[in-house]
């Protein structure tokens, strides 16, 4: 093998001698390829100090100092490797954060105070790879990167992810999750070298065999074969990356006009024009995304709860022609105070349930709100009540079988309170956003007023004439 490989926290089947102890100050001067699983990077477990008050604890100063020194040493070694054009593979294990002690003080006799900071098992990285989040799964999407085509063909079934990266800059993406913004593997050109992140690699159980007589595990032929093939893949990736990097970077003086052809200038101008168009399109899309978010807020009627549902209901009521707004005076807070063009005044309360129906708890809260509102000096007539419910909010509307509990329905009939399913309200609002129909708005308001004491049934949505093409 022409190139030397060193691994930390990752044992290649059949090549255990490649793995080095992370706790020793190993020199990477002779290494051409390094593979690191950050899972192995942590302070000494025997140095934990439990706090006498408040719970928790930290690693003592000695272990913390040693840990920081190890991180700094490894970071420098990796930085030097990248300057020399070498390749580093990082297997994205779970991110672990440690509370470490920088120093101690003794404010009172027998009392020790620790000056602490946090550090993680990824603080050895010579560059920022982006925002790292721990998460696990096996749904991994290959982007088709040609350098990793053979690697993916051989090992895609052995890959699992324990973490993903977001907001990574200047990288070629190799693997993503179903959400393509979640990066599971990438290539970053750093100096003259490359830093590669990959998902975790799991080995088959039949790669090892236990020898009872020697009380040891040994690699099987299948394991050794896997390891040999794996090394060949690492070497192939390194070779492809290195060959692409061997070309001498263009010196600054070579960009002077006397060395540039007319066609090259024309191409550069076209690229500049396209970059301006791309920037304009990106800025335009930012505005469109804001508009789309605003337009899609009516969908909150289908699946939201809490404040987002309250806001969606308030917006829907305003579309129906009501004057609706939240009320708060420091003592009393109401989801909605609603006044119709017909001068009917209502108090609204909203509730969403993940998998259940709307129960008596929110109904009782609405009754309290009605009485508290009526007690205000400026209110001369008691308002009507509307309970807006979003039961089974995480299920598709047509599959929902629940609405309001029997107690809610009995209470609504007695207290003359309207029960409105926000999923029904959604389709009403969707129609009205697409059609200007004041007559239908009036019918919907009448349905709510006449529905006091029961579940409101909105009038059928008018049929719209299909456009001929």
Image (tube, grey):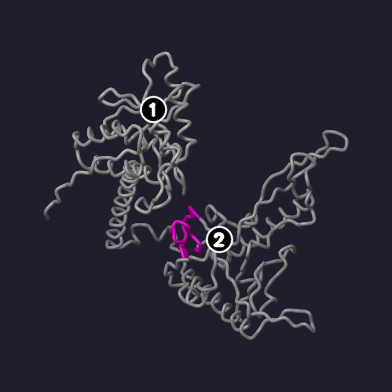
Q: Is residue 193 visible?
A: no
Of the residues tagged 1 and 2, which is closer to the observer? 1
Separation of disc 1 and disc 2 at Cα?
46 Å
Would you name the residue on which mark 1 appears? 347
Of residues 77 and 250, the one nearer the viewer is: 77
Residue 236 in picture, x, y percent from top left: 52, 77
Please, which residue is most extreme toward the top here? 377
Point out the image quarter for the C terminus.
Answer: bottom left
**Residue density around tag 2, few if under 14, some if 14–19, many if 20 or more, within 10 Å:** few
Residue sitting at x 62%, y 65%: 36
Would you name the residue on which mark 2 appears? 136
Residue range of the region highlighted in magenta in the rendering: 166-187
Residue sitting at x 72%, y 79%: 217
Residue 355 in picture, x, y percent from top left: 46, 49
Q: Above or below — where is 297 with respect to 251? A: above
Please, which residue is most extreme toward the left here? 468
């Amino acid at each position: 093998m022409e190139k030397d490989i060193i691994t930390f926290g990752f044992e290649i089947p059949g090549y255990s001698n490649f793995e080095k102890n992370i706790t020793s100050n190993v020199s990477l001067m002779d290494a051409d390829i390094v593979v690191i699983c950050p899972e192995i990077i942590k302070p000494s477990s025997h140095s934990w100090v439990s706090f006498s008050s408040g719970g928790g604890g930290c690693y003592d100063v000695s272990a913390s100092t040693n840990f920081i020194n190890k991180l700094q040493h490894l970071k420098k070694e990796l930085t030097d490797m990248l300057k020399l054009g070498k390749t580093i593979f990082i297997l994205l294990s779970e991110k672990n954060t440690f509370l470490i002690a920088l120093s101690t003080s003794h404010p009172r006799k027998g009392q020790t105070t620790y000056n602490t900071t946090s550090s993680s098992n990824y603080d050895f990285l010579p560059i920022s790879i982006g925002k790292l989040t721990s998460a696990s799964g096996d749904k991994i999407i290959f982007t088709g990167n040609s350098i990793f085509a053979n690697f993916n063909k051989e090992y895609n079934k052995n890959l699992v992810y324990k973490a993903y990266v977001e907001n990574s800059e200047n990288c070629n993406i190799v693997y993503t999750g179903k959400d393509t913004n979640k990066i599971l593997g990438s290539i970053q050109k750093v100096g003259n070298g490359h830093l590669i992140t990959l998902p975790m690699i799991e080995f088959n159980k039949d790669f090892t065999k236990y020898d009872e007589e020697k009380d040891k595990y040994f690699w099987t032929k299948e394991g050794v074969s896997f390891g040999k093939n794996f090394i060949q893949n690492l070497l192939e990736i390194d070779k492809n990356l290195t060959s692409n990097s061997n070309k001498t970077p263009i010196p600054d003086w070579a960009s002077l006009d006397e060395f540039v052809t007319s066609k090259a200038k024309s191409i550069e101008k076209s690229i500049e024009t396209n970059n301006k168009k791309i920037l304009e399109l990106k800025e335009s899309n930012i505005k469109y995304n804001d508009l789309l978010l605003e337009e899609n807020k009516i969908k909150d009627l289908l699946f939201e709860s809490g404040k987002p549902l309250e806001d969606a209901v308030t917006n829907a009521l305003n579309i129906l022609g009501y004057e609706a707004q939240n009320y708060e005076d420091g003592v009393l807070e109401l989801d909605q105070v609603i006044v119709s063009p017909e001068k009917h005044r209502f108090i609204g309360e909203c509730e969403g349930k993940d998998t259940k129906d709307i129960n008596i708890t929110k109904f009782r809260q609405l009754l309290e709100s009605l009485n508290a509102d009526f007690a205000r000096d400026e209110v001369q007539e008691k308002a009507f009540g509307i309970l807006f419910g979003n039961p089974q909010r995480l299920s598709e509307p047509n599959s929902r079988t629940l609405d309001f509990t029997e107690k809610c329905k009995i209470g609504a009939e007695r207290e003359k309170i309207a029960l409105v399913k926000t999923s029904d309200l959604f389709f009403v609002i969707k129609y009205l956003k697409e059609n200007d129909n004041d007559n239908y708005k009036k019918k919907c308001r009448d349905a709510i007023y006449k529905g006091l004491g029961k579940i409101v049934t909105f009038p059928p949505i008018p049929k719209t004439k299909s456009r001929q093409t």
